[in-house]
């Protein structure tokens, strides 16, 4: 499966989501993460430690795919993409995951992204990311507003947990982090992975 | 083989070279041209008519490679690439072809590109492109200067011929153009293709 993480607004946890979606798919079959974000956050993550799948920048994609067969490919993309770019990204994947954080500033960027995709692609779904345990109302309201707009939203939400920062600092997936909430963090991505696979 | 056309300076005939190198490789085995130049000149060329190989933008690369196996991949790249981008492009291919036109304005851009590559990559070679029949001296001098600098230059030079414009306008390779110099234009790329293949 080809899964692309995209949002015209940056800073919404795209790379963290890309890494854990790839971690999930790697439990099923060989998975390649292509980091085409200029910031190279996913590549930096992999270099700080060890991830269970292959990570390359977009320029090494052809060589990586010549070397071996990957059943699943996950793309992390730049935080600033124009309208044509968004449509091409959607056309180039099976499912586009649009992560967003339930905060006003992030919602503005999300609405821009959705307005560029709606009517031109239908293989995208919004992921409510970094949902705060003590402020569930914002996620509930955002989900209701998106559903009202006819936008598909994953049932799974990703909680805002420090375990993800620890995973990044150590260069590993959250499933391998020594933290009392690491299991909950990983469980969210396992559930999301199932949702991605089974539509 | 993975061949990448690149030059930090645009307007040096990168897309024309990419299309004809791909045309050459397609005579040998299935070839994919990935147009990652934002201007999408190679894609536009293919849409005006019919090219003998597959052309996709960089976002469709993974899907194209999932659909079928390509023995050869040719990349057309943006006209503005920074230092990191140039090095990653070189690392991601077997051979980087740096086309340049023997004119002072183009040479400045070429020198920038070469200064960013030298010492960091050795799989690149300069292609003297659009060489004017009635002004051979400029190409001779540029070749001598590059050789002096230790830069590898293809023995083959591509002549500046109207047949290439006709090919672009009709959306076909120059080999199929009805023009009395089309055969000479195509022969130059056949010779270049042999040079690329055999090092």
Image: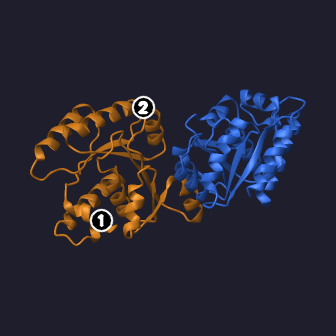
Chain colours: A blue, B orange
Q: Chain of mark 2?
A: B
Which quarter of the image is occupied by the C terminus of chain A?
A: bottom right
**Count of numbered badges drawn on the protein:** 2
Q: Tell me if A191 is positioned left or right of B115 in this view.
A: right
Q: Is residue B197 above or below residue A133?
A: below
In the drawing, does residue B92 fall left or right of residue B50? right
Query: At which x and y percent is residue B97?
Result: 35, 46
Q: Residue at x 65, y 51 (%)?
A: A114
Q: Do the residues under discs 2 and 1 have CB atoms within 8 angstroms?
A: no
Q: Residues within 10 Å of mark 1 (few under 14, many from 20)?
A: few
Q: Nearer the viewer, residue A114 or B199?
A: A114
Quick check: B50 above or below B86? below
**Quarter assignment of residue B100:** top left
- State the SS at label 1: helix
Residue A6 visible, this angle: no
Instruction: Tell me residue B52's x, y (percent).
Output: 39, 69
Image quadrant occupied by the N terminus of chain A: bottom right
**Measuring 42% from the left and 47% from the top, which residue is drawn there?**
B77
Q: Earlier in the sequence, mark 2 or mark 1?
A: 2
Q: Nearer the viewer, mark 2 or mark 1?
A: 1
* Residue sitting nearer the eye, A33 or B59: B59
Residue under the point 53% across and 47% down: A82
Q: What residue is shown with label 2?
A: B120
Q: Secondary structure at mark 2?
A: loop
Q: Is residue B7 above or below residue B76?
A: above
Q: Chain of mark 1?
A: B
Give the residue at mark 1: B169
Q: Position of residue A25 (x, y in %)?
A: 75, 50
Q: Is residue A110 left or right of residue B133?
A: right
Per the model, the C-alpha gap separating discs 2 and 1 is 38 Å
């Amino acid at each position: 499966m080809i899964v692309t993480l995209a949002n015209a607004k940056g800073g919404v946890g795209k790379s963290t989501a890309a890494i854990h979606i790839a971690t999930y798919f790697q439990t099923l079959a060989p998975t390649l993460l292509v980091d085409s974000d200029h910031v190279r956050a996913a590549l930096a993550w992999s270099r700080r430690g060890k991830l269970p799948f292959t990570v390359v920048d977009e320029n090494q994609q052809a060589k990586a795919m010549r070397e071996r067969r990957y059943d699943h490919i996950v793309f992390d993309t730049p935080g600033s993409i124009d309208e044509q770019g968004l449509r091409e990204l959607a056309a180039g994947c099976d499912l586009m995951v649009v992560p967003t954080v339930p905060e006003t500033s992030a919602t503005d960027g999300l609405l821009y992204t959705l307005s560029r995709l709606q009517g031109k692609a239908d293989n995208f779904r919004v992921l409510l990311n970094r949902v705060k345990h003590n402020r569930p109302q914002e996620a509930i309201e955002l989900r209701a507003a998106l559903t009202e707009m006819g936008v598909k939203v994953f049932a799974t939400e990703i909680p805002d947990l420090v375990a993800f920062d620890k995973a990044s600092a150590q260069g590993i997936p959250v499933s391998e982090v020594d933290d009392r909430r690491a299991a909950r963090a990983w469980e969210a991505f396992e559930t999301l992975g199932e949702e991605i696979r089974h539509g």
